[in-house]
Image (tube, grey):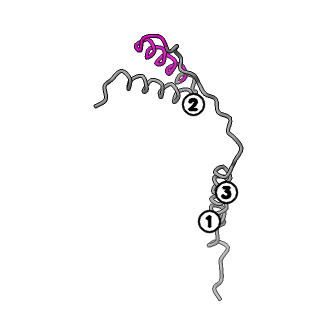
């Protein structure tokens, strides 16, 4: 029979496996969740009936404001709005 030295044995692999299983269980629970998520929709920072250049300026200012405040969701939202305006302004190639 092989003898196991206390120095050779380390709990790290076991702890790592338990942590991985916990992370996987969290992911599975999130995927199987049926409750609705709370979604906050940020409206565009401009009224629809103004010139596209003004819309771009207002959206860019909102993007900078959210970037400086560290609000990642707002930053991504207004970056999306700005990209949609740029697509309207430039012709498709």
Q: Measure the C-alpha gap from mark 1 to mark 3.
A: 18 Å
Considering only order in the chain, which callout, 2 or 3, is on the residue closer to the N terminus?
3
Q: Which residue sits at x=44%, y=14%?
A: 57
According to the image, label 2 marks what residue?
A: 73
Q: Which residue sits at x=69%, y=49%?
A: 33
Total marks placed: 3
Residue 13 screen position, x and y as percent: 62, 65
According to the image, label 3 marks what residue?
A: 25
According to the image, label 1 marks what residue?
A: 13
Q: Residues within 10 Å of mark 2 (few under 14, many from 20)?
A: some
Q: Which residues are magenta?
A: 49-66
Q: Is residue 18 above or below residue 30?
A: below
Q: Mark 2: which secondary structure?
A: helix
* Magenta-drawn stretch contains 78: no
Q: Find the residue positioned furthest to the right.
A: 35
Q: Which residue sits at x=52%, y=18%?
A: 62
Q: Is residue 3 left or right of residue 87?
A: right
Q: Residues within 10 Å of mark 3 (few under 14, many from 20)?
A: few
Residue 36 screen position, x and y as percent: 69, 40
* Magenta-drawn stretch contains 62: yes
Q: Measure the C-alpha gap from mark 3 to mark 2.
A: 26 Å
Q: Measure the C-alpha gap from mark 2 to mark 1.
A: 37 Å
Q: Mark 1: which secondary structure?
A: helix
Q: Residues within 10 Å of mark 1 (few under 14, many from 20)?
A: few
């Amino acid at each position: 029979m092989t003898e196991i030295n206390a120095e050779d044995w380390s709990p790290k692999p076991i702890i790592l496996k338990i942590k991985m299983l916990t992370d996987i269980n969290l992911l599975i629970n999130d995927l199987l969740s049926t409750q609705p998520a709370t979604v906050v929709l940020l409206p565009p920072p401009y009224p629809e009936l103004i010139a596209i250049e003004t819309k771009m300026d207002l959206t860019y200012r909102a993007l900078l404001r959210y970037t400086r405040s560290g609000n990642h969701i707002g930053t991504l939202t207004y970056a999306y709005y700005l990209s949609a305006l740029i697509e309207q302004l430039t012709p498709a190639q």
